[in-house]
Amino acid sequence: MTPVAATSAPPRDRISARVGALTPSATLAVDARAKALRAAGRSVIGFGAGEPDFPTPRFVVEAAAAACAEPENHRYTPAAGLPELRAAVAGRRGSWVEGSDVLITNGGKQAVYQALATVVDPGDEVLVPAPFWTTYPEAVRLAGGIPVPVPASADDGYLPTPDSLEAARTGRTRALLWCSPSNPTGAVAPEPLVEAIGRWASDSGLWVIADEIYEHLVYDDTRHVSMPDVVPALRDTCIVVNGVAKTYAMTGWRVGWLHGPRDVVAAATRLQSHLSSNVNNVAQRAAVAALTGPGDGLRDMLTAFDRRRHVACEALNSIEGVHCPTPRGAFYVFASVHGILGRDLCGRRIDTSADLAEALLDHAEVAVVPGEAFGAPGHLRLSYALGDDQLHEGLGRIRDLLSTGS
Ligand SMILES: Cc1ncc(COP(=O)(O)O)c(C=O)c1O
């Protein structure tokens, strides 16, 4: 029998268009490259990681150990999270948030994605102030939306204004992604700006996804201001994202949350019930302990971060061609390196911050993340969440390479 010729459907990529279009997380990639070089025996100093170098507080670890022994934690629990944890999250907000308004997620990252997936339809535009956290545009695209960067420079304190946001708004704009304190810049929006942007968003009928994961990491007399606290009119169109990762040195535990209007939380919970169900119960019990326990660990971290923040800024600003504003929050410095671009370094021309980051890794064994990853070419992000000795050594290497070119 003659075989029937296959119909000639056009060949398809093996990977779906949606997932194939994703770029790997640049920050995780830098960290992975630094670890691989270290494993190969090179003495790489990593400024790439977005995680505290402190251990999770002991009382949190002990709560988790106790939770391991409890059979109730060995079973499925409600997809929205343990009632005790949802109540603990709500208890840290005003009386306008109840436990039933909270969804516990696998880290803040999943909360960002689920928030977007819950309110964004294909073709909707989402305003993303730049420099932005590298995950935001990808999460917007995964949800079917179109990320629209709204740039701000060091001269603007790396912060958008109602005017810059309004200039980017179109009939398709659906949401604003708001992050203060900011990753990557460490900028913290002052209350008048938070209020003005919240009012603008509310008047414009936009959703706001407010990422507050660095809320407790602020320095000097800086205060974090939550947008729906100062603009109550926004509470029905605002989804707040947060988690234990940064505040309690718990990045590996994977516990975050979102809270918002009840219909949105219910819809996001339905999504999670098909995606990942409940977050690991032991990690949730650890998060309850973190949220309800003493804050000494956070105070110790803040003291160390504050000291290192000044050390990093001073060292970077002493290098010709580098300008590094002092950040007021998070644990990153974001330095402009425009003054270095166009130079030769170790026999190679440095045209972009990506070139510079590569040269720093190759010739100084220092891993930093180039601004390209954050929608802000011409910059480098350095996390100062690393030990003091490593910090000094790494900054010294950067200064030596950039000052002498060797
Ligand atoms: C701005 C911002 N939001 C959210 C997250 C997510 O944190 P996690 O998923 O570890 O809770 C991060 C982590 O780097 C972040 O920098």
Image (spheres, rainbow, N blue to C red):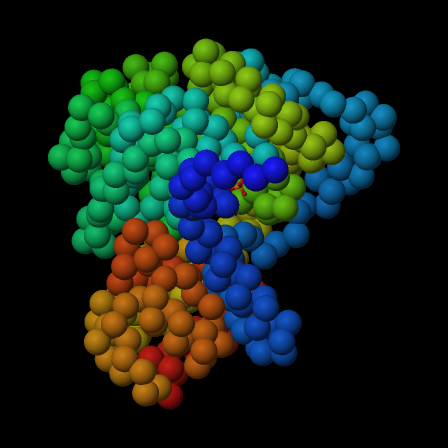
Tally the marks.
Answer: 0
Image location of residue 351, percent across then percent down: 25, 72
Quadrant in which the C terminus appears: bottom left
Left-right relation of 75 to 87: right
| Residue 321, above or below 12 | below
Residue closer to the observer: 310 or 128: 128
Q: Nearer the viewer, residue 374 or 221?
A: 374
Q: Is residue 99 left or right of residue 140?
A: right
Residue at 43% x, 65% y is 368
Q: Residue at x 59, y 34 (%)?
A: 106
Image coordinates for residue 205, horizontal then vertical, percent: 24, 18
Residue 256 figure quarter = top right
Frontmost residue, 340 versus 317: 340
Residue at far top of view: 263
**How far across and down, in percent of the image, does residue 357 sit?**
38, 69
- Residue 200 drawn above or below residue 2: above
Up-down relation of residue 173 to residue 99 (above or below): below
Is residue 216 among what the camera can see? no
Residue 54 in view of the camera: yes
Where residue 318 appears, x then y in whole percent?
A: 30, 74
Tell me if residue 52 comes above or below residue 213 in the rendering: below
Please give left or right for residue 256 compared with residue 181 in the image. right
The image quadrant that residue 361 belongs to is bottom left
Residue at 31 percent of width and 66 percent of height: 353
At horizontal 84% and vertical 28% (from top left) the residue drawn is 70
Work out whether residue 157 or residue 163 is closer to the camera in this orientation and state it.
163
- Tell me the quarter of the image containing the N terminus: top right
